[in-house]
Image (cartoon, rainbow, N blue to C red):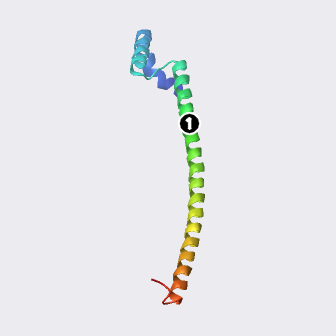
Amino acid sequence: MDALSALAPFLQLGAGGLLSLGILMILTGRLVPGGTVERLLAARDRIIEQQQGTIDRQEVRADLTASQITQLLESGKTSAHVLEEIRRLVEKRPGEGA
């Protein structure tokens, strides 16, 4: 019953008023054809799929980057250790350097 009472102001307009209201809603964009809505929703869904694909690729790229950084850090630590040992060995033998 509440639905009918909500329509009361529109029922008082009459047929001409309802037609004018419909045209006004079409012109202001509040009433659009179903095909247009479907096309807009399909475009939105395509954009969402593209963005999800981009996000997935970025996650894979971030994982790969983190793995490469870890490998580089380990090789850097090894290099630093080797250079430190070389320096320590050179310091133990005075007089043989330049």
Image location of residue 91, percent across then percent down: 50, 87
Q: Is residue 97 visible?
A: yes
Task: Classify 41 as above or below 22.
Answer: below
Q: Label 1: how many residues lie within 10 Å, few (<14), some (14-19) or many (20+)?
A: few
Image location of residue 37, percent across then percent down: 52, 23
Nearer the observer, 81 or 65? 81
Image quadrant in which the C terminus is located: bottom left
Furthest residue toward top: 16
Task: Classify 37 as above or below 51.
Answer: above
Q: Amino acid at mark 1?
A: Gln
Q: Is residue 1 visible?
A: no
Nearer the observer, 21 or 78? 78
Q: Secondary structure at mark 1?
A: helix
Picture residue at 59% right of the left edge, 68% below the top: 74
Nearer the observer, 96 or 35? 96
Picture residue at 58% right of the left edge, 45% below the top: 57
